[in-house]
Amino acid sequence: MNLHKVESSLRPSHSPRRSLSSSTSSLQQADSLLWEESLASDSRTSNRWSLRRIAGLLVTGAGMFIAAFFLITTGQLKTVWEAAYPTCWLGANGNSVNCPDKIKCPGLFPECSTAPCGGYQPGYCTGADGGYPASQVCSKSVLVATSGVVFGGVMLGMLFFGAVGDRMGRRFGGIATMAVMATGAAVMTFVYSPSISDMFIVISSFFGVLGLGVGGEYPIAASNAAEKRNEEAEGEASAAVANGSNGQTRSSESTPPISGKTPSPPLSTTLASQRGRTVTVVFSMQGIGIVFGSLIVVIAVAAARQITPNCSNSSNDEMGFSTIALSFAWRAVYLVGFLWLAAVLTYRVLFSRENEAYVKAAARRAERQRRQQTPAASQLSGYAPIFRHYGSRLIGTGVTWCMNDVILYGNKLYSGPIFNGINRNENLLTQNACILLNNAVSLVGYYVAAAVIDRRWCGRRRLQLFGFIMIAVFFAMLAGTYDRLASSNHGALIALYILASFFSQVGPNVVTYVSAAELYPSEIRARAHGFSAFCGKAGALVSTLVFGAIGIRNIFIVSAAAGAFGALITAIFLPDVTGMCLREHDREWELVTGGRRREYGGEAANPRHLSMCERWLGRGKAYRPDWLRVHREKRRREERLARISGSEGKQEAAM
């Protein structure tokens, strides 16, 4: 096979220093290595969490950090926008203001329905019926767009960049997503217009552009994280072989261990032993981004000295705050995010490289196309093969992610109004400090999940079930006690709400991300993860459109119902591959694409790793514990016969 053809079809022309296929030998061995079982050189070394390894994972998750920074912090910034632009953010909904004597025109706020108002200024009220000028008011659709448009972009980005990541590589996809995000963030930071409505229309539009990149970051980062663990362990095993130690390829005949030494475990065991923790640590950058964003908002509000309303200051608005000072505050928050994006984009362009798992998968795909003489553009490039083979599994990862995001984003994006309802009559700094506390406690949940997700007694499915059930319980308690405690015990409501958020992170928010990254083979992983995340953001979009109109108690009721339904779908449709090497998916997919699906009986068909639905459909009936050994021996016999036949053919031709 011509290596240069593979490289040209799988990488952009401006590829990095390291190409997709590092050598001809790696391409030639890609198919055979898929069926070999390597031995780990030292499982203790593979499982060691050094500072360098943790730093590498955090760099991988840098895109998740900034995605959460913008998505969630924008929800918190609504508390600032309500204070800075009350005629837009409060007037559209007819809400009350802190300083009735500063209302200039009638009809917008309930404190002044007819002229003249306390802050009347001659010649200012040029709007309809003597109301506020059109440049100072916003329609409800503009306010909804600041949250809704971004999720449209996120959903498109998940599907589009998921396909890009599978076709053109994780590195190219990562650079593209970061460039798109940086473009959106730059406009959001520096946009200005005398018309408040026009300004937020532009912000909403480019929030959608940023969302396109955010959506692409989900499948790219998840695929990189899941495959990075394989690359690390295989690299250690290869180094052991080079050094003459016990890292080796397991042959069909068992080699007895040297007396007095314990034989090394299979590399598959090492690969899977901490994969969940690896992906979770990458995903925890989402939580760090949320906390960091909340902290920056608190610092910006404090620096602007806009903590409590001051109705006596003539330059302040109807809420008693300075529009100019708060304008600088929220732009400073976005500026921090933009600078981070620029730094990550620079790093990815200059220093990132393609991971080996994708390189090998791309080589196998190219070799298959050569054998079948199938154009690259038509070879399993869409989503149809994924739905056909993994339909029930996509329900498990997609619908549960949808329920999780109804809860997560619905509550995070409306965290300002929710905390205004839970903790009434507090100043701007206190409200944002409460949101920061909630996000900080939620961050702990990521690391609790990382500590238990790879434990056999826990695993993915049980952890997600536990999380959904606890979410349903705590939000049901919030809904049942809200009317009574809102006026008598704010602290109890805040505690219940924080606990509900905590269990969201411990369970479904982490597991939905991890499972979608490890339940599919390398060739389709980014697309499958992208589709699952697309379903999640569809839930986020619905909650964004609905939660603003149903009241806080009803938000809690919907969140409890979503938790209960998520637990049901998890129990029926979600597989659990805790302890299984991801290479098994690639082995199964190799047979599926070759039209030999029924031949597979390896660990990916083990009933222990299948969902309840898949077991009902009979998918685990072909499982045999020794299937890999038998299939490997069969392949070797076929290869020997092919070589013998080839050599005999050459001899006959020579005669």
Image: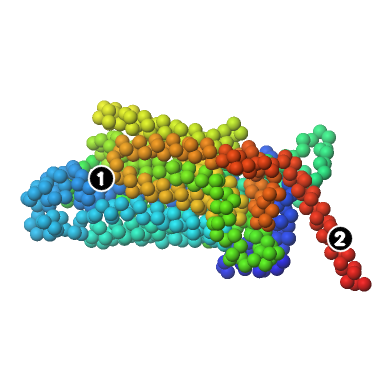
Height in image: 482 above or below 344?
above
Q: Secondary structure at mark 2?
A: helix
Q: Position of residue 193 (x, y in %)?
A: 26, 61
Residue depicted at x 46% and y 36% = 468
* Three-letter amino acid code of the residue under disc 1: Gln
Residue 438 seen in this snapshot: yes
Residue depicted at x 44% and y 60% = 180
Q: Quadrant of the C terminus?
A: bottom right
Q: Nearer the viewer, residue 426 or 510?
A: 510
Residue 644's label in the rendered image is: 2
* Three-letter amino acid code of the residue under disc 2: Ile
Q: Position of residue 596 (x, y in %)?
A: 69, 53
Residue reaching furthest to the right: 655
Q: Nearer the viewer, residue 269 or 353?
A: 269
2 and 1 marks in contact (CB < 8 Å)? no
Q: Is residue 430 left or right of residue 25?
A: left
Q: Position of residue 154 (x, y in %)?
A: 43, 54
Q: Is residue 442 left or right of residue 362?
A: left
Residue 345 seen in this snapshot: no
Q: Position of residue 239 (x, y in %)?
A: 72, 49
Residue 93's label in the rendered image is: none
